[in-house]
Amino acid sequence: MTTKKMKGLIVSVVIGASLIDAAMAQDWVPSRFGADDRIGAANNLSAEIVLQAAKLITTGKVYSLGVETAEDSPAYGTRTFSIDIIASGANVPVGTDAVTSNDERVTTSFGIGSQIDGLGHLGIGNQYYNGLTSAQIVADGGLAELGTHTIPPIVTRGVLLDMTKHFGVDMVSEGTAFNRAEIQAAASAQGIQIKSGDVVLFHTGWMQLLGNDNQRFISVQPGLGVEGANYLADLGVVAIGADTPALEVIPFENPQRVFAVHQTLLAKQGVYILESMNTAALAADGAQEFMFVLGQPKFKGAVQTVINPVAIR
């Protein structure tokens, strides 16, 4: 191939890729929150919502929604976690008080265990929330835009939809999708109205597999469908989570559309995803609404991060 033809091919590829990217972004850019927005559905939070959520506290009971992150935690792809303890001076006592100490060195992916997916996690054709491109957000020191450290504290009303009750099972089957009809039916049966600013969590019983059948836990699951994702986003929810490692239904509704719910929520709608939420205790107590509190660690430039949200009743 001649140099002239090679240059022509490169130009054609670049132009073609640009046209594909532009076409993909046509129907979801700019965001409903404006072309310069970087926090998505977190714009629906307010001081008034915090005060309303605080009124839901009647017993003072606190629930930890996170699970332990360990070296044997099931994780997608090449994500891993390891921790080593570094004893100060091999724990030789220092000073008159015989002080000893331990530090740790952690090597980890942040997308392991209970986690929040930020808006820079998953895109469509190298375009992310509000049409930001990979070139605009990816830097050597982490994400230059849409990092999880920029997510404001999420303090709001939490809603638990118990899908095990809806389907009348102990654990919802893999491949079961929750779309508008299922969500409305479950909410109606519980007497719940989902509102703007809410965090919605699904209880499926899937967490029973964690530590017992990790391969099945991570590879398939019940979960949110694309229509259901759009429905909840249109209601103005801030984040959606479940006791499953990916939130969305797997096998996917359309095998050709990989992680279509992630595309819908993160890139198109600016709604945060909460994965591997420990909802068992809430479900066992029949909790339907509660105060939800999350202040994620501020690791600058992180794509996602390990979290331990708190529910208070």
Image (cartoon, rainbow, N blue to C red):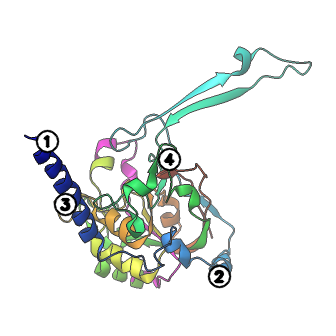
Task: Give the label on residue 16, or none.
Answer: 3
Kind of residue at disc 1: Thr
Query: Of discs 3 and 2, which sits in the foreground?
Result: 3
Pick out the residue farthest to the front.
4
> What residue would you read off at disc 1?
3
> What residue would you read off at disc 2?
52
**Contact between labelled residues 2 and 3, with CB atoms less than 8 Å apart:** no
Q: Is residue 248 magenta?
A: no
Image position of 73 with respect to 262: above or below: above
Kind of residue at disc 4: Gly
In the rendered structure, which disc, 4 or 3, sits on the residue that comes first in sequence?
3
Q: Secondary structure at mark 1?
A: helix
**Contact between labelled residues 1 and 2, with CB atoms less than 8 Å apart:** no
Residue at mark 1 to residue at mark 3: CA–CA distance: 20 Å
> What residue would you read off at disc 4?
142
Image position of 153 with respect to 233: above or below: above
Magenta stretch?
Answer: 189-216
Report the quarter where the C terminus lies.
Answer: bottom right
Horizontal and vertical percent position of residue 102: 70, 27
Kind of residue at disc 2: Gln
